Image: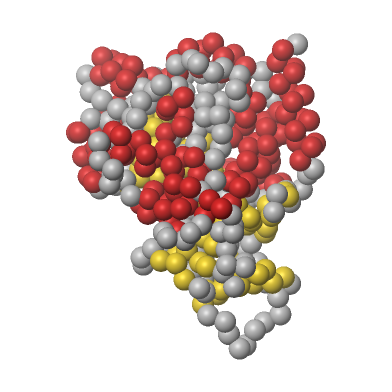
């Protein structure tokens, strides 16, 4: 058992609040949240928070972790040119060993940003899953069915395999995007969703060109097309959602779908700004993702949170738009629920011990006028003191505990990048 004491605790249920309670973890779960007790058990470790904040870890609700190898490789390009000229040709050269190393590199960046789980759509899923398990990190794999897949039926085999692979790994259904996936393949995935009563996700209305293209092809927006073929019969959502129409937004709200915004990636690729505040006011459920390091180029939830709220203030011409407290909820609670991890959404007895500790004894956190606003507007990775996943400390005070020397991970990643130039 591990005891965290002498600090603050950010809790979300039933309402967001900051308490002076202590937190105990026992194995992979939180066993106690409350005041100091007289009947203290024997702890293997007791951590004095020294006034710092313990909170649920951030959930990265859309990413492509192993794309770390493309970081800063193709700057200054819009999405389609970036994909066709840089990304897809190089992805064709990926190997299992490369994905394993590149995934671990991404996990290290997540941990140092207080992120405790990811929702990942990429390739070489066996190597990807193994890297997460070996590192002790939690992930949900999303299938990315598209026209380049030689065997669409592998999606079902992966769905069954990775949902029984390891407690840190699960799998959800998805297509890469409407514009990369033929109608018959989209219908195939919709049939799988019906068979397993499963939610589905996809890149959705990321660019103006993409949104307009779907209307030209099918006479309707992508969300309405997916609705027509039963894609969203059992829920799910979309990544990016920059160009949802008012009708699309109503549809998302009425059908309890998730919109995952990725502001840094959308800005860097000049894709657009998602109407997050309009969606929020309409009742759409919202979460936050980083997208991949190839288009971001960081995997930093603090930067994403700041951009979510700041961009909405400009977009709406309203300084009160998208309050910090709502953005923090998107990054923690909503992210967990969006990706099927409801047991990781709060600091409460019985929940999984996926937590982060934020150092409040840094200049950017003082004074403590409004702690949630400090986290969203002023917080940074320098404030992440500790990150725990499934009851194990994987990052603390700048050190990683993921089963491999960081220098070995760096070397393996660099070696693969050099091989692309050979």
Residue 1, image quadrant: bottom right
Is residue 326 in view from this perspective?
yes
Q: Where is residue 207 shown, x and y percent of the image?
A: 36, 22
Closest to the observer, 13 or 133: 13
Is residue 122 in view from this perspective?
no
What residue lies at 41% left-to-right and 59% top-to-bottom?
370
Position of residue 209 relative to residue 312, above or below, is above
Image side of residue 262 versus residue 409, left or right:
left
Q: Where is residue 231 shown, x and y percent of the image?
A: 34, 35
- Residue sitting farthest toward the bottom: 38
Image side of residue 140 versus residue 136, left or right:
left
Residue 299, image quadrant: top right
Q: Where is residue 211 shown, x and y percent of the image?
A: 30, 22
Q: How is the image coloured?
A: secondary structure
What residue lies at 23% left-to-right and 30% top-to-bottom?
245
Which image quarter is the C terminus in?
A: top right
Closest to the observer, 407 or 416: 407
What residue lies at 80% left-to-right and 43% top-to-bottom?
405
Closest to the observer, 257 or 191: 257
What residue lies at 76% left-to-right and 40% top-to-bottom?
406
Position of residue 164 relative to residue 343, above or below, is above
Residue 186, image quadrant: top left
Q: Where is residue 300 shown, x and y percent of the image?
A: 54, 40
């Amino acid at each position: 058992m591990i005891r965290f004491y002498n600090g603050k605790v950010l809790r979300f249920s039933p309402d967001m609040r900051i308490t002076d309670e202590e937190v105990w973890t026992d194995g992979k779960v939180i066993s106690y949240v409350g005041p100091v007790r007289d009947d203290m058990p024997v702890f293997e470790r007791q951590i004095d928070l020294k006034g710092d904040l313990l909170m649920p870890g951030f959930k990265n609700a859309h990413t492509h972790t192993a794309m770390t190898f493309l970081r800063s490789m193709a700057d200054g390009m819009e999405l389609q040119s970036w994909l066709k000229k840089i990304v897809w040709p190089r992805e064709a050269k990926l190997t299992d060993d490369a994905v394993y190393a590149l995934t671990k590199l991404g996990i290290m960046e997540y941990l140092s940003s207080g992120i405790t789980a990811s929702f990942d759509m990429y390739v070489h899923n066996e190597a990807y899953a193994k890297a997460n398990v070996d590192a002790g990190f939690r992930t949900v794999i999303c299938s990315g069915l598209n026209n380049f897949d030689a065997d669409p039926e592998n999606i079902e085999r992966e769905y069954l395999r990775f949902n029984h692979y390891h407690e840190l790994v699960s799998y959800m259904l998805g297509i890469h995007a409407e514009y990369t996936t033929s109608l018959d393949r989209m219908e195939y995935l919709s049939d799988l969703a019906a068979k397993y009563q499963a939610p589905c996700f996809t890149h959705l209305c990321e660019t103006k060109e993409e949104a307009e293209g779907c209307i030209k092809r099918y006479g309707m927006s992508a969300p309405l097309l997916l609705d027509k073929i039963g894609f969203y019969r059992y829920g799910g959502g979309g990544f990016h959602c920059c160009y949802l129409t008012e009708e699309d937004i109503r549809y998302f709200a009425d059908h309890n779908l998730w919109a995952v915004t990725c502001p840094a990636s959308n800005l860097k690729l000049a894709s657009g700004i998602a109407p997050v505040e309009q969606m929020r006011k309409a009742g759409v459920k919202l979460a936050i993702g980083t997208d991949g390091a190839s288009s971001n180029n960081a995997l930093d939830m603090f930067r994403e949170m700041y951009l979510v709220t700041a961009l909405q203030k400009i977009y709406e011409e309203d300084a009160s738009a998208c309050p910090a407290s709502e953005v923090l909820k998107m990054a923690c609670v909503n992210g967990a629920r969006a990706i099927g991890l409801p047991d990781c959404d709060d600091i409460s007895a019985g929940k999984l011990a996926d937590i982060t500790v934020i150092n409040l004894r840094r200049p950017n956190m003082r004074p403590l006028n409004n702690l949630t606003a400090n986290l969203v507007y002023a917080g940074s990775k320098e404030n992440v003191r500790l990150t725990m996943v499934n009851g194990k400390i994987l990052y603390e005070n700048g050190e990683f505990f993921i089963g491999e020397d960081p220098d070995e991970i760096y070397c393996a990643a660099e070696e693969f990048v050099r091989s692309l130039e050979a």
